[in-house]
Amino acid sequence: MSSTAPFTLGSLPTLSRSTVDRQESLRTNPERLVKRWPDARVVLLDDTGRTPVLEGGKTLATRETGGFGTEPPPEAAFLGEWEGVDYWSMPGAPAEGGETVRMSGSWGMVEEVLRVDGEFWVDLRGYGDLLDDTSAGLFTTAQALRNWRRQARFCTRCGGPTELIQFGWASRCATDGREEYPRTDAAVICLVHDQEGTNGEHVLLARQPIWPPQRYSVLAGFVEAGESLENCAVREIREEVGVEISGVRYLGSQPWPFPRSIMLGFAARADRSAPLTPADGEIEEALWVSRDEVRAAFANSQTRNAGAVPTPIAGGKAQLILPGNSSIARVMLAAWAEAEA
């Protein structure tokens, strides 16, 4: 029997990082929040979910509250307190003008970013991993609340209009008084490796038809009503690639507010000799990739912008682009790649 320990996440997923105190007692104390509003800071989010960061920096370019009134306006959402400062999110937009610049983004793709007055307006998926812990937590929370507010304008019971209460953390129906709270949808993401040793020698990767060529990741799916997380992992892998898994174990989690998910990471084992049957319309290709090939792909991703050529998978069948730095999938794959079988 192998003495190697099962692999664990080597680092915290980038969107799980946070430092702010967001306890409920802070946002249900109107007197405190109104009193501290003049010294608070505001995180702006435009209609597409972008926020400004200082050029070359790792910190959000927050705003003073003076331009938003003497008290928190109805559309303001309280994000939390850090080092004696309250943080809020508000709708906002970049000033007119500016220029579009090209930056290296998630999945090794080049993204177009607006630069205005020394600030980049960036999105969470492409830039979240480059932020410091405080900024990553603020941006993730602001994005999650924004997406919920856009979908919570009407009561789920009577269809009447709703208003925000608790400084952005609840809505109340103007007709029947029903209260609703931000919803999070649970999704399981599972790294499946083969049965060699403790951690396997190969990992099962797949690609969706809508993804750019060469992009592969581990498999994921939403938890259904009345289903445990472990049973969801078994069902999703069976449905998507036709493989039976065992030894399902928990690794870690990450908020994924696109629009309102929490990704729950698991690892499992499967027989590499079993046939792979990709689900029609959902999975374009599934294949087993060796640890050495994954390690090479990580090395290539560090130097891709310098002109490195991705290493082919399985004798030239495909080339591997790993999940983006903001995804828990990348942390899971990195931890597995660094482990011993």
Image (cartoon, rainbow, N blue to C red):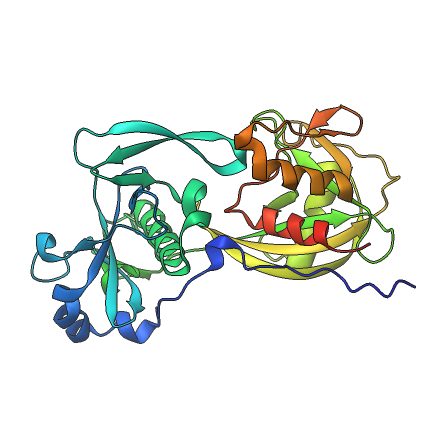
Q: Position of residue 129 (x, y in %)?
A: 46, 49
Residue 222 in view, yes or no: no
Q: Residue at x 21, y 43 (%)?
A: 92
Nearest the viewer among 248 and 160 is 248
Looking at the rendered image, the quarter that the C terminus falls into is bottom right
| Residue 314 sits in quarter | top right
Q: Residue at x 31, y 42 (%)?
A: 55
Q: Position of residue 82 (x, y in %)?
A: 31, 68
Residue 282 appears left or right of 2: left
Residue situated furthest left in the rendering: 70
Nearest the viewer among 134 and 245 is 134
Residue situated furthest front in the rendering: 306
Residue 59 appears left or right of 62: right
Q: Residue at x 87, y 55 (%)?
A: 197
Q: Position of residue 175 (x, y in %)?
A: 21, 55
Q: Position of residue 283 (x, y in %)?
A: 66, 31
